[in-house]
Image (tube, grey):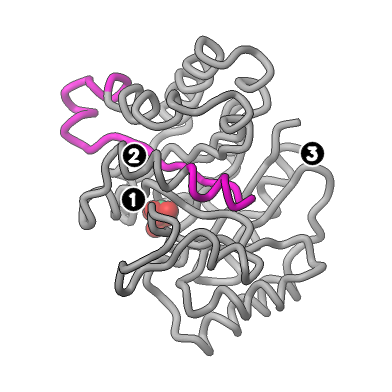
């Protein structure tokens, strides 16, 4: 069954105390999650263990924003998938455009990371999306296809059915400029068609494809109403409890 998800990506924001307060406000005031609706908070590493305890039994779940591609060893400053699993982390964001750009993450590294996350019983939230220049040149479908082929098409069906996808057009991230619902739906439908061709009907229909990029309460209703948009990966608006809760409610209303 397809899952509907609002996932907050705090990125490099919130001191320890700020993060705890924000998480408490979300789980105290946020709606109960029913059926196949999920809410995930992807926090910096320092928050994960505490958030996992705070969220235990609430239905809300915790994600990391990255992990290392190797199992363990001499990688100073890095965090492995098994470490994340050991503190109750359930999802890991991988392939975010900020990491592709600033940390040089490529398909080969991301495939290893996806395998680490799956191998440790967690679920990857795999991000992809084009830059402004690629959209303007009309090569956005081609680019997205290559990002998906380079990583997800290398997985078995058993692995693929656990992956959550997130389309994040880079030009819409943190810019206040959202993809229109028509642009989002067009790309999401395209991605689902790619999954259909490669993995078949069941995986294509059951895969969750999130939209990310300046998604906020004022545009969420329109985006979440799209047939192939199964929720959002939220940056800025996940840092304010009221906005984030409004997004959870918007998704519940759109996919009830
Ligand atoms: P914004 O919602 O701030 O545009 O960020 C989106 C994002 O990158 C989520 O991962």
Quadrant containing the N terminus is top right
Q: CA distance from mark 2 to mark 1?
A: 7 Å
Quadrant of the rendered structure where residue 15 is?
A: bottom left
The structure residue drawn at horizontal position 46% and vertical position 63%, both measured from the top left corner, is 80
Ligand 1 is within 8 Å of the C-beta of the residue at disc 1: yes
Callout 2: SS? loop
Position in image of residue 29 (x %, y %): 74, 72
Magenta highlight range:
115-142
Residue on which the image places disc 1: 173
In the image, is residue 194 part of the stretch drawn in magenta? no
Quadrant containing the C terminus is top right
Quadrant of the rendered structure where residue 112 is?
A: top left
95 vs 142, left or right, is: right
Residue on which the image places disc 3: 256
Q: Is residue 148 above or below residue 61?
A: above
Asked whether disc 2 touches disc 1, contact meaning CB atoms under 8 Å apart, the reply is yes
215 vs 105, left or right, is: right
Residue on which the image places disc 2: 169
249 vs 169, left or right, is: right
What is the crowding at mark 3: few (fewer than 14 residues within 10 Å), some, or many (at least 20)? few
Dot 3 or dot 1: first in sequence order is: 1
Q: Is residue 59 above or below residue 226?
A: below
Callout 1: SS? loop
Indicate which label's residue lies in the foreground, 2 or 3. Answer: 2
């Amino acid at each position: 069954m397809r899952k509907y998800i609002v996932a907050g990506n705090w990125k490099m924001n919130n001191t320890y105390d700020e993060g705890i307060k924000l998480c408490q406000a979300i789980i105290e005031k946020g709606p109960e999650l029913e059926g196949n609706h999920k809410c995930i908070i992807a926090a910096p590493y320092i928050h994960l263990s505490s958030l996992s305890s705070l969220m235990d039994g609430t239905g809300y779940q915790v994600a990391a924003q990255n992990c290392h591609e190797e199992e363990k060893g001499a990688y100073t400053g890095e965090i492995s998938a098994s470490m994340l699993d050991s503190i109750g982390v359930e999802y890991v964001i991988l392939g975010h455009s900020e990491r592709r750009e600033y940390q040089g993450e490529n398909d080969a590294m991301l495939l290893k990371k996806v395998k680490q996350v799956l191998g440790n019983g967690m679920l990857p939230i795999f991000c992809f999306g084009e830059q402004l220049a690629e959209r303007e040149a009309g090569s956005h479908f081609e680019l997205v296809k290559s990002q998906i082929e380079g990583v997800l098409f290398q997985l078995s069906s058993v692995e693929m059915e656990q992956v959550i996808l997130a389309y994040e057009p880079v030009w819409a991230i943190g810019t206040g400029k959202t993809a229109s619902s028509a642009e989002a739906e067009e790309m999401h439908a395209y991605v689902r068609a790619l999954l259909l061709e490669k993995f078949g009907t069941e995986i294509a229909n059951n895969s969750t494809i999130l939209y990310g990029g300046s998604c906020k309460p004022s545009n969420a209703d329109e985006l979440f109403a799209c047939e192939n948009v199964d929720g959002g990966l939220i940056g800025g608006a996940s840092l304010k409890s009221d906005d984030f809760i409004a997004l959870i409610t918007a998704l519940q209303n759109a996919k009830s």
